[in-house]
Image: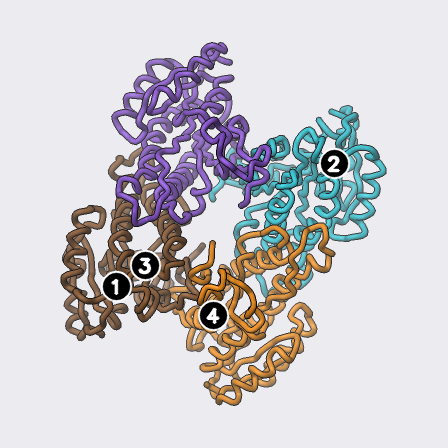
Chain colours: A brown, B purple, C cyan, D orange
Amino acid sequence: MAAASSFYSIVAGVGAGTGRSVAIKFAQTYPVALLARNPANYESIVKEINAAGGKAIGISTDVSSQSSVTNAFAEIQKEFKGKKLAAAVYNVGGKFVRKPFLELSLEEYEAGYEANGKGFFLFAQATLPSLLSSVPDSPHPPSLIITGATASLRGGSNMSSFASGKFALRATGQSLAREFGPQGVHVAHAIIDGVIDIPRTKGWNANNGAPDGKISADAIADSYWYLHTQPRSHFTQELDVRPYVEKF
Amino acid sequence: MAAASSFYSIVAGVGAGTGRSVAIKFAQTYPVALLARNPANYESIVKEINAAGGKAIGISTDVSSQSSVTNAFAEIQKEFKGKKLAAAVYNVGGKFVRKPFLELSLEEYEAGYEANGKGFFLFAQATLPSLLSSVPDSPHPPSLIITGATASLRGGSNMSSFASGKFALRATGQSLAREFGPQGVHVAHAIIDGVIDIPRTKGWNANNGAPDGKISADAIADSYWYLHTQPRSHFTQELDVRPYVEKF
Amino acid sequence: MAAASSFYSIVAGVGAGTGRSVAIKFAQTYPVALLARNPANYESIVKEINAAGGKAIGISTDVSSQSSVTNAFAEIQKEFKGKKLAAAVYNVGGKFVRKPFLELSLEEYEAGYEANGKGFFLFAQATLPSLLSSVPDSPHPPSLIITGATASLRGGSNMSSFASGKFALRATGQSLAREFGPQGVHVAHAIIDGVIDIPRTKGWNANNGAPDGKISADAIADSYWYLHTQPRSHFTQELDVRPYVEKF
Amino acid sequence: MAAASSFYSIVAGVGAGTGRSVAIKFAQTYPVALLARNPANYESIVKEINAAGGKAIGISTDVSSQSSVTNAFAEIQKEFKGKKLAAAVYNVGGKFVRKPFLELSLEEYEAGYEANGKGFFLFAQATLPSLLSSVPDSPHPPSLIITGATASLRGGSNMSSFASGKFALRATGQSLAREFGPQGVHVAHAIIDGVIDIPRTKGWNANNGAPDGKISADAIADSYWYLHTQPRSHFTQELDVRPYVEKF
C-alpha cells in the first residue's frame, strides 16, 4: 500500500465486486477516492485499505447529479491537495431494469442512460483536466478506464434501458479515446461478459454452477491495472472478458 | 396517392430531406402524419401531398416531451379514426453538436440522447401497440424504421453528444427488433453514412464535389419502402447506405 | 422476361434455393448465365426461364478452378457476344463441414476457403473488368452481389471451415467495395441469417416449425434486385436478413 | 530465464519484432521453440536466450506445409521430451501483398490465406492436443495466442489478400475459443493496429514521426504474457492495441 504517492486515483461505482477489487489494487500504488451513492458501499473498503497502510477516502456521490459530482471533486481536491490524478475508473452500473418494452416507464428506460451516459459525462469532465495535467510526469499514462458489459455490444430483448446506457457509454468512451489519446491520456473500455463472483451473486446458477464459472473481481482489477500500466506506444482501447465456460 | 387506405403511416422528424421524401413515398400508399417541432418543416409537404391527391396531416411535436408526444398521438388517433398503423418512421436528427469534450455543456451533451434515446423511446411506446394490432391484416408487416448515421457505429472525436444518442438509438432498435420481430413487427435500422443531398447541404463540398457524391433523399425513401415491404420470412434488421465515392 | 436486353447477368452457385430465385428474378430483365458444378443444378432452371420467354444458359463450372472459370467465361462471352454485363451474383455455398476442430482434415478445413475465398477471387477477377466497362451505360450501376451467412460475422464452435471461408469472402467483398465503388461498380454483401425455405430443408425444424420460419428464396432475390437497382448516390454495402422469429 | 521448467512454449513467426520480444518474454518462464521459415530469423534470438540462461531452440518451418509442420513438432517433442506445452503463439505475418485487385495473381491473393488460414490451421491442430493435456497442471491456463491486425476487422482497398487471410484467422480463432475455452484452453486474439517499432520500420513515417508513434514490440510481448496469465474465470478473447497517436 502506498499512502505517500504524489499521485492518486478515483474509483466511481464501488460495491462488493469490481469496484472493491479495483480500489484495493490501485491503492497498492496510489491513494484512492471511492465514490458511491450509499456510504455503506465504500465504508468497509476504506477501512480495509487504510488499515493495510494505504490511503483511501469515501465520498457519497450521485454521479448523475451535476452538483453532487462537483461537491465530490471539491472534496477530493481538498483531501488530495498537491497530488495529481493518475487513474480514474468508471464502474457505475446503475439501476438494472429488465422488462418488456411496453411495461417500461420513461424513468425506468432513462435509468440506463442516467448512470452510464450522463453520469459518465460528468465524471469524465471532472477527471479529464486532471488526467491531462498529469501526462508529463505520471508514472504510467494517466488512464480513464470504463466498465462495459455484454449489453455494450448487443441490445437484447427486454434490455433497452441497460443497453441504451451501455451503448452511449461506449460511444462516449470511443470519442474520448480518439480525442484524448493523442494527448497522452489512455481511455480504455472493458466489456465484462458474464456474472461477477460476488456475495450478491452467490446463489446465481451461472454456467450451470461450473467451477470458476463467474468472473473473479480480482482478475478484473488486474486487467484494469494492466491497462493502466500500458505504455503510450501500446494502448488497448477495448478488451472483452468472460469465464472460460461462458457462451458467446 | 392513396387517401382512402384503411392503414396510415407516421413520419417523425420531417424537414427538407429524408423526412420529406419518405413522407411522399409512403403517402403513395397510406395517409401519413408528419411530426416536427417546427410547423414550417412540414407545412409545404402536407400541402404537396394533399394537392397530389394523397392525405397528410402535420402536427407540431417535441418528440422528447412526453406530453407533446401524447398530444400528437391523440390528434393522430382522431384524424385517422378507424385506420390502422402500417408504418412508423423515426427520422429525428436532433441538435447536432460537434465540439471538444471539455467545451460541452451537460445540455449540449444530452442533446444527442434527448433526440435519439428519449425521443425514440416515447415514439416507440406510442406506435408499437398500434403496430402490433395491425399485424393480422396489414398489407405488409407493420414496420418501425429508424434512421441511424455513421455515428451509430463509431464514436468519433468531438462527436460524443451525437454518437451517444445514435448508439443508444441503435441499442434500443436492436432490443425492439428482438422483442417485437417474433410478434410480427419489423424493426429496421438504416445507417446513413454520408451527406444527404438537400437544399441545406447545397454548398457542402462532400466527396470533393463528385457528381452524386451526396445521398439522394428519394433513394433513402425507396430503401425505407423496400424495408417496409419485406415479408416476415425475410426481415432486414440493418443496412448501411453511402454514396459510391464515400470513404468508409 | 427479357431475352433481348443488351445487358446480361451471371449467377454463380445455382441450386434449388437462392440461386434459382435470383436467376429467375434477374432473367426478367437480363439474359442470365447460370454456373454450377453439377448441370443438374441449373438444367431445369434454364429450361424454365427459356420457356417463359427469357434467355438463360447453364455452364458446368468449378469456381475454385482457374481453368474451369476461364472456360466458363469464354463460353459466356461467346453466347452473349455484344452484350455487356450488368450484374454478377456470387452465391456459392461450398461444402459445409461442421465438426470438432481436431477431427477436421486439412482438406475439410480448406473447403470453406476454396468455395468462398479462392472461388470468389476467380469470379470477381473474371467479372469486374466487364462490370467496369458497363458503368457508362448500364441501366443500373453494374453490381457484384455476394451471399454471406451468419458465419460471416461469427466463428462458431465447430464452424472453423465455413466461417473462415465466409470471413475471407466478406473481407474481399469489403475491399472490392472500397476499390470499385468509387469507379461506379456496386459491391454488396448480404448476410443470410437463417435457414432458406427450399426442398432440401423441408424437414428441418427451423424456429420450431413457425410459419414463415425459414427465409423465402424469392424474397432474397427481391433484395438482390433491390440492391442492383440502387442508384450510385445510395449504395448499400451490407444488409442482414432473417425470419422474424429467428434468434440473433 | 527458466531452462528447467517442466512446461515449454512455442512461438511461430519469429523475426526482429513481435516474435523476438514474445520469445524473450516467455523464455523467462518456459523453454521456447521458435519457428520461422528462414533460420536467420531465429538464430540470434536463440543464442540470446540461451546465453542469458534460458532455453531456446529454433526450427526452420514452413507453417503452410503439412509435412514441414509435422517435422517441426516431431523435433519439438524430442527436444522438450517430458515437458508439457503451456503456451503457443501464432505470429505469422506471411507475404504482405498490397495492390489493385485486378493486378493480383491467384498466388498473390492466396498468400494471405496460406499464412493466416492454412498455416494457423496446421499450427492449431499440432498444438491443441498438447495444450489440452496441460490443462490439469499448467501454472496458467494453457494458451493459444494469435496475432491479428487492422485488416482483421476491415477489408481495405487493395488489401484483399492480407485481409482475407486475417479475417479467416480471426474466424478460426473465435471458433477455437468457443470450442476449447470450456475445456480450459485460452484462445486469444490481439489486433495490432499500427506500425511496430522494429529495425525494418525505422525509416517509416508512422504518425508523422511522433515519439512512441510506433508500437513497442516489448509491450506486445507484455500483453501476450498478461493474456497467458489470466485465470480461467477471466479470459480475454480479443483486445486491440495501437499507439496513442494512431487514428482509428
Residue type at mark 4: give it. Ser
Element class at badge 3: strand
User: Which residue in the structure is indicated by mark 1?
Assistant: A85
Local SS, label 2: strand
Residue that mark 2 sits on? C85
**Viewer-nearest of discs 3 and 2:** 3
Mark 3 to mark 1 CA distance (whole Å): 10 Å
Q: Mark number for residue D108? A: none
Same subunit: marks 3 and 1? yes
SS at circle 1: strand
In the rendered structure, the residue with mark 1 lies on which chain? Answer: A
Dots 2 and 4: beta carbons under 8 Å? no
Q: Residue C118 in the image: x percent, y percent? A: 70, 53
Closer-to-camera residue (A182/B12): A182
- Decide if residue C200 is in sight here: no
Label 3, label 2: how far apart the Cα atoms are: 54 Å
Place of residue C204 in the rendered image (x, y in percent of width and height, measured from the top left): 58, 42
Q: Residue at x 30, y 47 (%)?
A: B103
